[in-house]
Image: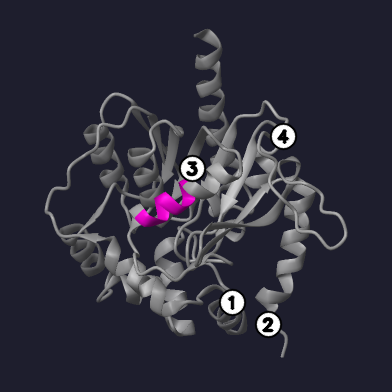
Amino acid sequence: MVNLVAAQRPLLHGLMKMAGVRPYTVEIEPGTVMNFWVPNGTITKPKKGEKPKPISRPKTNKPVVVLVHGFAAEGIVTWQFQVGALTKKYSVYVPDLLFFGGSVTDKTDRSPSFQAECLATGLRKLGVDKCTVVGFSYGGMVAFKLAELYPEMVEAMVVSGSILAMTCAVSETTMERLGFSSSSELLLPNSVKGLKALLSVAAYKKLWFPDRLHKDYLEVMFTNRKERSELLEALVVNSKDPTIPNFPQRIHLLWGENDEIFKQELAQNMKEQLGEKATFQGIQKAGHLVHLERPCVYNRCLKRFLASLHANEALK
């Protein structure tokens, strides 16, 4: 029987290519590769029998925006409604983090720091020196690490449905409130019932899909289960109050006001912790999946923030 989710992939990939991005695999180091969707003009058109190569200095003056996905889907599925909205004015890069999409490693490090280090290496190999990073959920935590470790690369951040670090206290409180025994039970469902429970928590509007579609989605999107479980374990920080880095970047927190996983109050507290360079904006009638539930509103807010960055640059 045809997997309906897998069957839709060629259509989605075709739409992304029409929007101006195409897939490219980068070897980070021996044993580690990351898949990126990159702007068409940043890699060469291969001759017969050759592989495409990145252009060291792409011919574009467009600012770079990097979209970093969450835990329940690979990059292009997560950001399918944002890519086309951004490519006219921005060079858009959409990575698949390690153990998502085509990205894998034989290293044992599962920390967000390692994800950020590999992401930075991949971007540099693609000729990216500076960028604005947009991170959702797990991708937001990786984005925070990227901004902390590589402040010269990350000029600004937009974060949705994420926190600086998943402490034991936050993890336990969140899972208890949502009625799950662990983050793995929530984020790595192994049954149609489990996936429905995840969607009911993540979405503001209660969505209905046939069981077969849930089953097909589980089969396609929830691969590398052992490694992803290890990613979740490595995410939890033992310290009660983690040190807040002194981020030099502007950070915009763009939130679904009805986010049940990371509530709006957490975002407001984080804004205070981050200081005067941080701003907050809520989107009504949207949950954790704000960029998928209300893409037009989300894109409008995102583009307004991005435009303000470059308006400030012009005034300098």
Q: Residue at x 23, y 40 (%)?
A: 269
Q: Is residue 74 magenta?
A: no
Query: Quarter holding the N terminus?
Result: bottom right
Q: How many marks?
A: 4
- Local packing at callout 3 (Cα closer than 10 Å; few below 14, some 14-19, many 20+) is many
Asked whether residue 285 appears in the rendered view, the answer is: no
| Tag 4 residue | 88
Disc 3 versus disc 2: nearer the observer: 3
N-terminal of the pair, mark 3 or mark 2, is 2
Q: Earlier in the sequence, mark 4 or mark 3?
A: 4
The one nearer the camera, 100 or 78, is: 100
Q: Is residue 160 above or below residue 300?
A: below
Q: Residue type at mark 3?
A: Val
| Location of residue 136 in the rendering, given as x and y in whole percent from the top left corner | 45, 51
Query: Which residues are the magenta region?
Result: 114-120
Horizontal and vertical percent position of residue 35:
59, 59
Amino acid type, callout 1? Val
- Percent from the top left, x then y, of residue 214? 56, 79
Q: In terms of secondary structure, where does tag 4 sit?
A: loop
Please name the residue that numbered disc 2 is placed on.
3
Occupied quadrant, residue 137: bottom left
